[in-house]
Image (spheres, grey):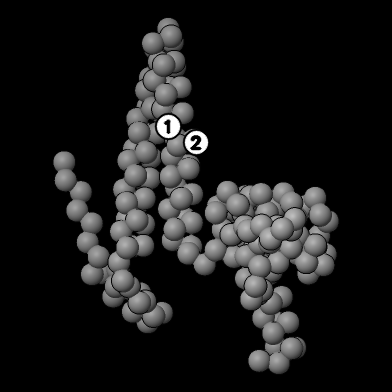
Amino acid sequence: MGDDNMNEVMREVLDSLAKIGKQWGIGESVGRVLGFLLFKSCPVTQREIEEGTGYSRGLISRSLGKLRKGPMIRVEREGREIRYSINTSLTESFGDLLKRFLADDIKPMIELLSTSLDKIGDAKVKETFTAMLHEYRKLKLAVLIFSRIMDELNMMPIDIEEGNVEEVAKNISVKIMR
């Protein structure tokens, strides 16, 4: 692939990932930094990301922080330098993100709603709290189920080509027992 073609592909991918970053609420810069790392064959420094994206060091640092939480990137220290590369295991990253969402957001909210329920005197407000608590418990169940599915997918030896994704999905069964 020639340099012009590669630059065009890189621009399109970076623009698309920037748009996705904005839509997901993590920021265009996060998507663009992730896209930049996708095109690097070896780990890069923050300065190299700065030169490649035109972003300030502060914006890159914040973007890398968000990507670390994903964990969408790998971080390695070489002497005094920190180098960043893309984590190509998106399913593992997404599974980790789900588990962190469960621990950091869902469980604390369930705890807060549960402990607050007895302190509420107004019947209508109590009803609303109870309904919200029920919804968070359903969300917890959904995240737990989806996390297990992601864990199973990561352990399965699946080679998926674009044409047979739907076929592979049909062969995976999920059984919910009550």
Q: Which residue is mark 2?
A: 104
- Left/right placement of residue 177 relative to residue 53 reads left
Spot occupied by residue 83 in the image (x, y as percentages of width and height): 68, 61
Say which element carries label 1: helix
Q: Residue furthest left?
A: 178
The residue drawn where x is 70% and y is 88% is: 5
The residue drawn where x is 35% and y is 77% is: 159
* Res. 19 in view: no
Look at the image and tell me in which quarter the C terminus lies.
Answer: top left
The residue drawn where x is 62% and y is 65% is: 85
Spot occupied by residue 64 in the image (x, y as percentages of width and height): 68, 54
Spot occupied by residue 97 in the image (x, y as percentages of width and height): 48, 49
Query: How many labels, in total?
Result: 2
Spot occupied by residue 29 in the image (x, y as percentages of width and height): 72, 57
Asked where in the image residue 1 lies, by quadrant, the reply is: bottom right
For disc 1, the neighbor class at 10 Å (few under 14, some 14 to 19, many from 20) is some
For disc 2, the neighbor class at 10 Å (few under 14, some 14 to 19, many from 20) is few
Q: Which residue is mark 1?
A: 107
In the rendered structure, which amino acid carries the disc numbered 2? Asp
In the rendered structure, which amino acid carries the disc numbered 1? Lys
Q: Determine contact: label 2, label 1, CB under 8 Å.
A: yes
Q: CA distance from mark 2 to mark 1?
A: 7 Å
